[in-house]
Amino acid sequence: MLKLKSNTFRIRHNEELKRFITDNSNVLNIYSNNSDLSINNSGIENFIIKINSDASDNIDQLNNNFYSLIIITDIFELTDDVYRLLNRLKQKLTKDGKVIITSINPKWNLLLLIFEFLKLKNKTVPRSYIHSKKASNIAEGVGLELINSFSRQVFPFELFGLGNLINKFLEIICFKFNFGINTYFIFKAKNADYKMLSKSIIIPAKNEEKNLDPLLSRIPNFESEYEIIIICAESEDNTVNKAYEIQNRLSELDIKVMIQESKGKGGAVFEALKITNGELIAILDSDISVDPETLRDFFEILEYGNGDFVNGTRFIYKKQYGAMRNLNSLGNIFFQAIISLVINSKLSDSLCGTKVFKKSQIKKILEWQNLLKIKDPFGDFDFIFSAAFSGNKIVEYPIHYRARVYGSTQISRFKDGFRLLFYFINSFIVFNSSKNIK
């Protein structure tokens, strides 16, 4: 008999949540006593709420701990006071904390009732069905902002081992229609408190000998601790020696020089990430196409808690003549449409070399790469996609894009463009389907 397997549903649900949990997360997982949705990972506190009790009162009984992530499942639609529940959750969050609310998709209301009538599914207590836009408006009132929402599990049946394949196919085909049984709302706490953080600035350099001096002279002197990592690829000019000369001359600064062993800018950045010490990490191209002085603003966005990942955008201000070829501009427009489709969030630029994010994101970047069969030729998209995939708030900072003064671009446009297209297809599948379970 075709039967909704709660175990399959539960495992898929837990696998979906894992992408939002980091090693240093202090996680509270709240679920009803009517479901077995505990998560047995270190650093996760499971808390059960009785179905007929008031969820807000139950949360008041928690200890005085604060959490970087609160997951609440099968509770939100049963509470009689949604505002009060969200307000209590907000009070239990750390400065940059997030709340993930999982609920039954309203589109499945009638079908689930039919399943219960036909005894294909166990009966549940009456519940409310709250649309994401309504939930977002209510959350705004308590200081929570909606980062993203999506659904999973269109086909929640095991069906003799074929369920995973059928479910993944339907999720991909129906991605625009939000047909999954489970909906996920990711909220982030709004905060205006400033916290100064240490910084690492990664500068990939290849054939950039004449750019390094002016670049380094324009990097701001930050009040917090900061380090500068220059990673040099094999060059036709004197880039490596110039980097060492600057390191010796500016000995009062914490400058590290590395010789790149891998190929490409992406390889350079990932090699440098292994030795970073800062709580915030910036990637800054060495061609001075982006004003180094703007790093102060990039960092402040994260230090004020106004985002988790800052992406530079070159498409706000008028670009300096010669800064970008017309073919590149057209290519960027094409790729931006695909990127917005993949991550379900509109970005105006993604190939800008300047990006700033938290060091804690590094593990999530590596986890994202392990999910893909096709590699990002630049590395830029791995950073953006992993941030979106793990529930981080991505914000854009407008930069004035300057023409290169010395040297020439290192990008192979056509070859890398085709590789990116296949990479996007792979990313789209990962973004819009459940992880297969064994």
Image (cartoon, grey):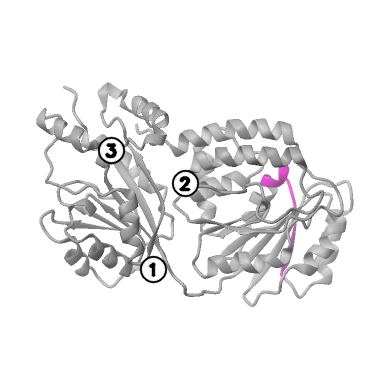
User: Comparing marks 3 and 2, which lies closer to the viewer?
Assistant: 3
Q: Which residue is found at the position 76% from the left and 46% from the top?
A: 324
Q: Earlier in the sequence, mark 1 or mark 2?
A: 1
Query: Which element carries disc 3, helix, strand or loop?
Result: loop
Q: CA distance from mark 1 to mark 2?
A: 21 Å
- Residue with the mark numbered 2: 389
Q: Earlier in the sequence, mark 3 or mark 2?
A: 3
Report the quarter where the N terminus lies: top left
Residue farthest along the bottom direction in this orientation: 223
Residue 18 showing in the rendered view:
yes
Neighbour tally class for label 2: few under 14, some 14-19, many 20 plus, Cα within 10 Å: some
Report the quarter where the C terminus lies: top left
From this view, report whether residue 438 is shown above or below residue 288: above
Q: Is residue 366 left or right of residue 191?
A: right
Query: Which element carries disc 2, helix, strand or loop?
Result: helix
Q: Amino acid at mark 1?
A: Thr
| Total numbered labels placed on residues in the image | 3
* Residues in magenta, as a range: 254-266
Query: Who is closer to the viewer here, 210 or 349?
Result: 349
Residue 257 is covered by the magenta coloring:
yes
Residue 436, horizontal then vertical, whole percent: 38, 33
Residue 37, horizontal then vertical, whole percent: 24, 47
Q: Earlier in the sequence, mark 1 or mark 3?
A: 1
- Residue with the mark numbered 3: 181
Residue 422, horizontal then vertical, whole percent: 59, 30
- Residue with the mark numbered 1: 94
Q: CA distance from mark 1 to mark 3?
A: 30 Å
From this view, report whether residue 64 is shown above or below residue 107: below
